[in-house]
Image (tube, helix red, strand yellow):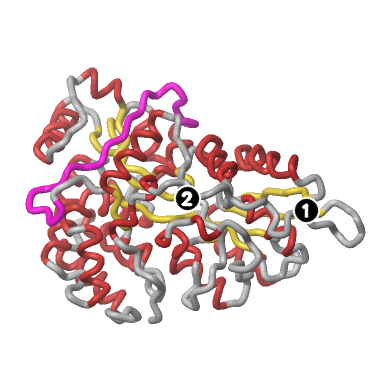
Amino acid sequence: MKRRHLIPAAALAVGALALSACAPSSSSNGDTPQDPTGEEITLEVWSWRTEDVAAYNRIFDVFTAAHPGIKVQFEAFQNTEYNQLLATGLAASDGPDIAQVRSYGQLQANVEAGQLEQIDSTVSGLDQFPAHVIDSSKGTDGGIYSVPLATQTFQVYYNKAIFAEHDLEVPTTWDQFLDVQETLLDAGITPLAVGAKDDWVLPLIHDTFGSSRYGGSEFREKVLSGETDFTDADYVASLQVLDDLAKYMPEQITGVGVVEAQMLFTSGQAAQYPGGSFDLAALRDLAPDLDLGTFPVPAPPGSVQNAPSVPSWADGNFAISANSPHKEAAATLLSWMTTAEFGQLVADELNMFSAIPGVTYSDPVMAETWADYEAGGQPYILLIDFRFGDPFGTAVLGVEVQRMFLGEQDAAGAAAALQDGVAAWFTPGQ
């Protein structure tokens, strides 16, 4: 496998990077492109974020106000159907002009099919992104095919009212963390709202509780170089940590989906919800008055990295369809998506961590989470590095964790299955 540039561990603290010089104008040539007929250009933008339609419309209203010759038509599809719809749409002439695309390995199918425009020379502002962020937008040929949207993180949300009612404090050690779970369990409250029916979330849940145990970025470098693999004793131990925590999760956990887990948490039946930064808007929609906080999970005993870890990756990028008849106008919109103005709108309207350096977060929950990320951000390695072949590492581990929760698999077996899966296409050191 031809690898792209690796993400240096020190580069993970995106927020520590200063905002670069003022971004270029939102059009690569300083002018708003015009249709040859003189009519307004309509750019069709596709996404899987059905929950963000209103927010994106407000965001694009800011763009169109400054570019009166361009109209943006935003359309969102169900996330479970989006990949197939996008593949079909990008192959046709009536598909989107701009599409929200996956990052890292999941971007490759679209690149290899020739469905996306390479934007290195047509979109301005790409040079301001940190190297590990822009890597999410590159093909294995080294070309840039999309503009990064957000940095995603995963941590534990908690209900402040329930914590106060039971005299609980945010845990800073593993023993304190377990004491919180036992207190909640004794009180008849589900400690951790986890939905294991949706296997895609389980590798993230694992990293939330186990990244410190196996060593985060240090382990990543060893796996990529071939010094070790996923059968490493520390990685097996990290999976065992997750299995040991299953007693604090909902009964019949593999029958509970992510949405049901969110509802358990927002209804007060569960006190904590291990979730992503991308979940914040949904949690607030379900319970607008819920007083939320977040915390990173303390390092378990025997951890290689004796500090809390916050799994993180770049996601939600936007790309230009190779079949778009409006590529110049699309490049104008993508250039605007590299500006501080757009980055701040991502933070304020989407409640997401912008990939653009220097954005500020006035929301207290976001500010708290971002500070934890800056202190302990670690790469979500199964997404960043192990989605470049078939099977995806995330797909293998998701199923194996489900089997672990059902008692059909143990930690060592899950790790071995993961290693066997990625070994089908991954060659260390390349």
Q: Can residue 27 be seen in this view?
A: yes
**Could you tell me which residue is drawn at 33 percent across and 26 percent down?**
268
Q: Mark 2 points at which residue?
A: 355
Q: Are the residues flagged by discs 1 and 2 in contact, CB closer than 8 Å?
A: no
Check disc 2 and report its element: helix, strand or loop. loop
Q: Which of marks 1 and 2 is nearer the N terminus?
A: 1
In-image side of 150 versus 416 (left or right): right
Residue at the extreme front of the image, as rendered = 21
Check disc 1 and report its element: helix, strand or loop. loop
**Could you tell me which residue is drawn at 30 percent across and 31 percent down?**
158
Does the segment drawn in magenta span residue 285? yes
| Residue 369 point in image, percent of width and height | 34, 38
Identify the magenta region: 284-305
Q: In which quarter of the image is residue 289?
A: top left
Q: Mark 1 points at which residue?
A: 32
- Magenta stretch, overall SS: loop
Does the segment drawn in magenta span residue 4? no
User: Which corner quadrant holds the N terminus?
Assistant: bottom left
| Residue 26 point in image, percent of width and height | 67, 51
Q: How crowded is mark 2: few (under 14 residues within 10 Å), some or many (20 or more)?
A: many
Which of the two discs, 1 and 2, sits closer to the camera?
1
Looking at the picture, does residue 172 appear above or below residue 300? Answer: above
Looking at numbered disc 1 in the image, what kind of residue is underneath it? Answer: Thr
The CA span between labels 1 and 2 is 25 Å
Looking at the picture, does residue 200 appear above or below residue 84? Answer: above
Looking at numbered disc 2 in the image, what kind of residue is underneath it? Answer: Ala
| Residue 29 point in image, percent of width and height | 73, 59
